[in-house]
Image (cartoon, rainbow, N blue to C red):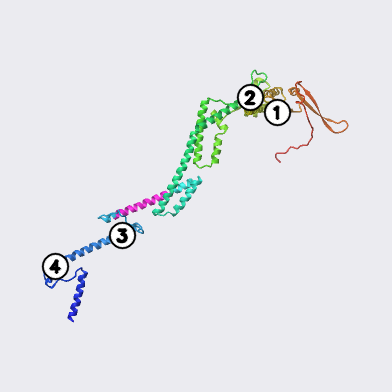
Amino acid sequence: KNAAVTKDRLDRSRRDLEQKGLTEPLSETEIFRDYNNRRNALKNDQRQFSEQKKQLETEISGLRQGLDKIADGMNLQGTKPSPAFTLQNDWKKQLDLLLSSLKSSKEDISNKKEQFLRSYNKLRSDFNQQSGLLSNLFQGLDAMLDRASDGYEPFYYLYERMSDHAGILAQQLSMLNTRLESLDRSQSDVVQHCWFHGSKIHDELKRIEQRSAVHLEGRSTATNMLRIGMELDSPEAAKVRMQAYIEKSVQEVREEYRSGKSTREIKSSIDKLIQSRELLNTYLGTTRIPVFVYKIDINMSNSRPKIWEDAIRENSGGEKFVIYFSVLSALMAYSRAQEQVVRSGAGEDMTKPGTRVLIMDNPFGPISSQHLLKPLFDIAKRYNTQLICLTDLKQSSILNNFNLVYMLRVRKGAASSKEYLKFDEFKRSTDLDDKDEALEKAFYRVSDFQQMKLWD
């Protein structure tokens, strides 16, 4: 029985030795050799191992605290250590610095993200409706921005898309700048054409003025019935003004183009800027161009030019009629002259002087006075205009101005109550051709007319 107990104890001791890394106990002859020294050495080893254990436990506790700090500071899911990272001896200080830097970086990223969103929303608000291209670009970015989180990849993809869009916009800007440069290069041509157009209008208006000249009784030289107040300092000064005007106009058109206005709106603005009146105003350097008409007085010494507005307001009916007639005749003569220039350029024979015909109904009501009749017929003669006038006046001062007069009378039949039209022909010139100057047909009609009222 004792042997079995002893064997059991021996087996347990052997297992303890194996757990401690030993295989066999000392032999009996060595058990009592230097026993005390060996015992003391083992106790020292035990103390050292115990201290090392405490030190390791302390380090493990510190590492766990550090891991908790890391977990609080960042999301560890999917995070892998960097191969280039080197752990320093004072890893706690190193960890605190890294976490502090990470926190600062997060705050900086958050601020930049908010700043980016504010800038992006402002750009979208300012330019989204400026053009279809910008609207499409913003629409694509909005979809990506809605899906973007704080992760790296969504914002990187957003960055790539914005870089692509920036390239598209750069191409569009390059194309627009090319167009603007082309506009700048052709600006000198535009200035020259506009200056020439303003000069042409100025010269044409002067021609109209010159064509209104007639010889009035008591005057040794021809008198302009129409005068346009245009005083040009010099063609060179006009060109300088036109240069400044075109530069200002180009700048206005450029700003409209950049603001996103439609092509139709820009074209309308250009049409307004190059209207003939605008170019003439720039050519002359003034927006006020007064028109003077000649007032014919019964006393020729009192006849004088009057500004158009005053003449229309102050002149008598007969004087205004002569003014209207002179202006109309001058414009007709100018238009016919321009037409002859065009037709002669087409190869037609324009050597014969131009003639005009005016048919007027009772024009002598307000101008039966001789001092107005004489200029009226002088103007007609000056412009080679034939007058066909209907009137019920029989004064010789009127009839003596016509080479051919038909006087119509209504007569009743002798045997019936019917009326018929009878005319008498008076010729003051024997040179009239019976075929060319003859009344072919006339009829008489009586009707009751009621004037329509403007207001009920």
Q: Mark 1 = which residue?
A: 358
Callout 2, which amino acid?
Arg
Q: Is residue 222 above or below residue 86?
A: above
Between discs 1 and 4, the one toward the N terminus: 4
Position of 55 with respect to 448 (left or right) is left
Callout 4, which amino acid?
Arg
Q: Are marks 1 and 4 in contact (CB under 8 Å)?
A: no
CA distance for labels 2 and 1 = 18 Å
Of the numbered discs in the image, which one, if any, rests on residue 38? 4
Q: Mark 3 = which residue?
A: 67
The percent position of residue 417, horizontal first and vertical second, equals: 86, 33
CA distance for labels 3 and 2 = 105 Å
Residue at the bottom extreme, as displayed: 1
Q: Mark 2 = which residue?
A: 211
The answer to whether residue 109 is seen in the rendering is yes
Callout 3, which amino acid?
Leu
Image quarter hosting the N terminus: bottom left
The residue positioned 27% from the left and 62% from the top of the image is 61
What secondary structure is found at the residue carrying circle 4?
Answer: helix
Between discs 1 and 3, the one toward the N terminus: 3
Residue range highlighted in magenta? 95-119
